[in-house]
Image (cartoon, coloured by chain):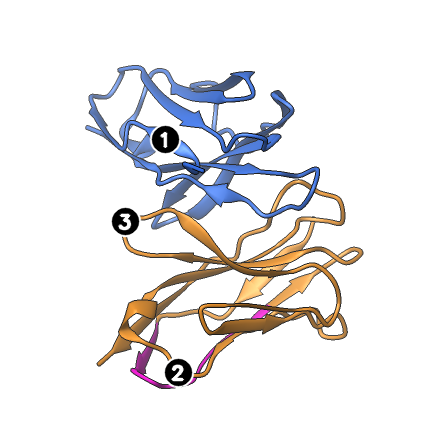
Amino acid sequence: GNSVTQMEGPVTLSEEAFLTINCTYTATGYPSLFWYVQYPGEGLQLLLKATKADDKGSNKGFEATYRKETTSFHLEKGSVQVSDSAVYFCAPQAGAGSYQLTFGKGTKLSVIP
Amino acid sequence: DAGVIQSPRHEVTEMGQEVTLRCKPISGHNSLFWYRQTMMRGLELLIYFNNNVPIDDSGMPEDRFSAKMPNASFSTLKIQPSEPRDSAVYFCASSPTTKSYEQYFGPGTRLTVT
């Protein structure tokens, strides 16, 4: 199955700063790609997804582009808010056609006023 | 839609007791996943079902763990006997895998074994 390498945290940013969380994966075929977010005390929530090369997933000001050449799916946001403080997980599909997702270790983001 | 429903939300039990965690997936989803999350090991897939059939249980830690899915709207994860190292947050997730592969997570059950 696929493996995923995610930028280690924790990451601390000031409000309105630019955010990038790097994610690269190994892949056979072209898996669907996902980012999840976990707020304290809650389950993981789907943040955005991309299902084919060059697709850009976006939600709540976050974006990530499916880059097949570099097998990357970096998460970005132009201006973070305190409410974005959470743990972010990159999760490629475990293989083309697989029902499983391979979750990264998670990156904890703290945004300070 | 109500989303994935898990019960109980919190469970505190003594070592050696049986624990049963419950999950109701989103209606119409045909795959169901059980995960465990700890600080030390992160998020681990324990088992998943497709159309109520267990497909991969290689993540189940040992024979003390068992999972069932008697119908499309209900699944259980049982630990018998429980041990302190089983303390974790257990998540259930479901997925409409005939259409797409994203998974939708429940709020989790925080299990503490003393």
Q: Residues within 10 Å of mark 3 (few under 14, many from 20)?
A: few
- Residue A45 lies in magenta, yes or no? no
Highlighted magenta segment, given as a residue range: A11-23
Q: What separation in Å lies between label 2 and label 3 (alpha carbons)?
A: 24 Å
Closest to the observer, B34 or B65:
B34
Amino acid type at image mark 1: Gln
Does residue B39 lie above or below B70 as drawn? below
Where is residue A29, by image quadrant? bottom right
Residue A8 in sight: yes
Where is residue A108, by image quadrant? bottom left
Where is residue B38, by image quadrant? top left
| Image location (x, y in percent) of residue A12 | 31, 77
Q: What separation in Å lies between label 1 and label 3 (alpha carbons)?
A: 14 Å
- Please name the residue that numbered disc 3 is placed on: A41
Residue placed at 44% from the left, 52% from the top? A45
Q: Which chain is orange?
A: A
- Please name the residue that numbered disc 1 is placed on: B6
Amino acid type at image mark 3: Gly
